[in-house]
């Protein structure tokens, strides 16, 4: 299962923890780091069992799950910039008067009103999540949609892709898998998204590539490697330095 799938399909408890557990390992939902069970991991002068080491990884690499989630784009969190700033200050343990001062809010009572509004949003979210869970048990006609990747720059109709559609598109344009390369570059946006996502999945998430190294990798897939590279960036899969000398997969 892809990391985006793990992230979007995680339970509330798993999301709060920031990692997914299976029989053999713990996987960070935030960056795909995998910690194998049954191994003792060193950090400085201290040894940690696998689960504690995963929690340490989240602290060291992401500061906290809250910090990672609050830093996601507003189209994913559903928060306004104002709500985002309020939540950050509340999470830091700031009192209403401190929040009022830092944000330049008119009065303490206004801050309390914002707290109430956020609690109302929480209640609404709980009801909606419960209804969606109940719907899953009754709706036999809902197709299995592919979750959007977390780093998508803009989610629109292109992302309404079912598992069946994805397989059909990959069979058409990558009939022999990544080793066989593209038969041709897809003409439609939805097809491009599926293919570019498949290409992104073949790129090592732990490697920073020079432009030459990335070009050589993409040449094996399609002659127009510049086009592939551009769409990897446009769809939010790749990031790069300002001068374009280094490239890496976004988490």
Image: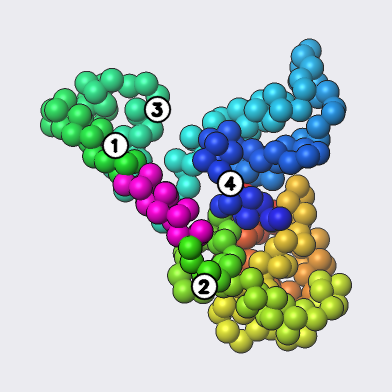
SS type, badge 4: loop
Residue at the spot of label 4: 10
Residue 128 lies in the magenta stretch: yes
Question: Does the residue at mark 2 contact the one at mark 4 (Cβ under 8 Å)?
Answer: no
Examine the residues drawn in magenta and state their main secondary structure.
helix
For the residues labelled 1 and 2, the Cα–Cα distance comes to 34 Å
Q: Quadrant of residue 218?
A: bottom right
Residue at the spot of label 2: 141
Magenta segment = 124-137
219 sits to left or right of 94: right
Query: Few, some or many C-alpha atoms within 10 Å of disc 2 (few <14, some 14-19, many ≥20)?
Result: few
Residue 139 lies in the magenta stretch: no
For the residues labelled 3 and 2, the Cα–Cα distance comes to 41 Å
* x, y percent for residue 195: 68, 74
Identify the mark nearer the N-term, 3 or 2.
3
For the residues labelled 1 and 3, the Cα–Cα distance comes to 14 Å
Q: Which mark is residue 91?
A: 3
Query: Few, some or many C-alpha atoms within 10 Å of disc 1 (few <14, some 14-19, many ≥20)?
Result: few
Identify the mark nearer the N-term, 1 or 3.
3
């Amino acid at each position: 299962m892809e990391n985006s799938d793990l992230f979007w399909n995680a339970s509330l408890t798993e999301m709060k923890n920031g990692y997914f557990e299976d029989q053999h390992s713990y996987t960070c939902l935030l960056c795909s780091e995998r910690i194998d069970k049954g191994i003792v991991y060193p950090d400085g002068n201290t040894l940690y069992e696998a689960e504690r080491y995963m929690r340490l990884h989240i602290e060291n690499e992401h500061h906290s799950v809250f910090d990672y989630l609050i830093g996601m784009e507003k189209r994913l969190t559903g928060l306004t910039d104002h709500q985002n700033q309020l939540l950050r200050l509340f999470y830091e343990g700031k009192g209403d008067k401190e929040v009022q001062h830092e944000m330049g809010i008119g009065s303490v009572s206004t801050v309390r009103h914002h707290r109430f509004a956020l609690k109302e949003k929480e209640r609404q979210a709980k009801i909606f999540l419960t209804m969606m869970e109940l719907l899953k048990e009754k709706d036999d006609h809902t197709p299995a949609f592919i979750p959007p990747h977390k780093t998508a720059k803009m989610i629109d109709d292109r992302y309404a892709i079912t598992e069946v559609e994805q397989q059909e598109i990959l069979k058409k344009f990558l009939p022999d898998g990544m080793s066989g390369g593209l038969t041709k570059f897809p003409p439609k946006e939805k097809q491009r998204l599926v293919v570019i996502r498949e290409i992104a999945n073949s790129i090592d998430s732990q490697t920073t590539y020079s432009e030459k190294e990335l070009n050589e990798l993409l040449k094996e897939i399609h002659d127009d490697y510049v086009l592939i590279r551009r769409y990897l960036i446009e769809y939010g899969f790749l990031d790069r330095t300002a001068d374009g000398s280094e490239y890496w997969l976004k988490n």
